[in-house]
Amino acid sequence: MKKIAIGLLVLSTSTLALADTKNFAGFNAAIGLGVSQTNFKMSDNEVGVDPTGGSLDTVQNSSADLGTKSKVIPSLELGYNLPIDNKFLLGLSVKYDLTKGPKSNGNGSYSDPNQPYTENSSYSLQQKNHWSIALKPAYAVNDKVMIYAKVAYHNAKSTFNSNYSETGSDPESYNASVKQKGLGLGAGIEYNLSKNMFVQFDVEQIQYKSKSVTNTFSGLDNFSTARDYTSVSSLKPSTTVGTVSIGYRF
């Protein structure tokens, strides 16, 4: 009888220990709508080479902030929450954006009174195939509310389009796609609507590493001599996104 009483006490203590966290534990899936604000910064370096074997000629070094663009993006998230004790959990989630990100456009021009040409350029940048893996340490305030922090690895493809037009030269266009990796930091709150249904809101700031794309085209130097130019453009996006999701806990 004594052993049975001890067993029941241990069982009740264990149940009490997970009284809050059990309401958020296990596998879950959520569909969300996020407002994404993406800023693309770009630096551009052009170097000219004389096709006959002449010396290098640095033509232009420039940087540009192509502005911040916003877009509503639907997403799908799958996750799992592991209870640590009665208040703390450790979550892991994978998230995928179902549409492309916002598109940034920019224009530039370059001219020198000592050179017989003017260069005009236009750029467009956009992210697609964006996904992330996040670690989410969480705290159960009660059986309905959970708050969490978020540290995430992000991976996306940036599509880059540039158009150059120079005096005395044919227009040039260039398209490229580069993979970009970044780190996201954020926080959120989750509210249980029922045993299985919940709503979630979080905000995240994502910083991507700079990635370069290279383009070659032809133009004129200050002696009206044809030159081959190499343009190296470095792309560095950053994104702030706020997402509202509705989910189901299995």
Image: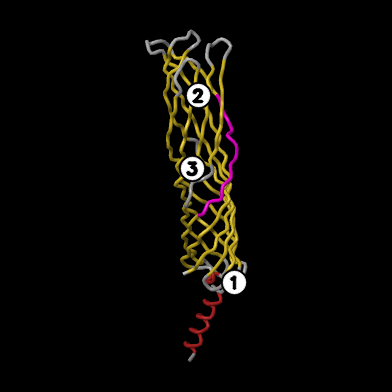
Please state the total of marks drawn on the protein image.
3
On the image, numbered disc 3 is attached to which residue? 127
Image height of 61 relative to 239, above or below:
above
Which of the two discs, 3 and 2, labels the residue nearer the N terminus?
Answer: 2
Q: Is residue 19 left or right of residue 217?
A: right
Q: Secondary structure at mark 1?
A: loop
Rendered image: mark on residue 197: none
Residue occupying the far bottom of the picture: 1
Q: Position of residue 115 (x, y in %)?
A: 54, 11
Q: At 48% from the left edge and 7% from the top edge, which residue is drawn?
A: 223
42 inside magenta stretch: no
Residue at image position (50%, 10%) is 222
Crowd around label 2: few <14 · some 14–19 · many ≥20 (10 Å) = some
Q: Amino acid at mark 1?
A: Asp
Stretch in magenta: 62-74
Which mark is on residue 143? 1
Q: Position of residue 185 (x, y in %)?
A: 56, 49
Vertical side of 127 occupied by 2: above or below: below
Report, in whole angstroms, how far the alpha carbon at label 1 lies from the one at label 2: 56 Å
Judged by depth in the image, the label closer to the viewer, 1 or 2, is 2
Q: Position of residue 12 (x, y in %)?
A: 53, 81
Front-most of residues 199 and 16:
199
Q: On the picture, is 132 further left or further right than 86?
A: left
**Residue at 43%, 26% in the rendered image:** 215
Say which label, 3 or 1, has the lower sequence index.
Answer: 3
Report the Cα–Cα distance between label 3 and label 1: 38 Å
Q: Residue at x 58, y 45 (%)?
A: 70
Q: Which mark is residue 45?
A: 2
Q: Is residue 119 above or below residue 1?
A: above
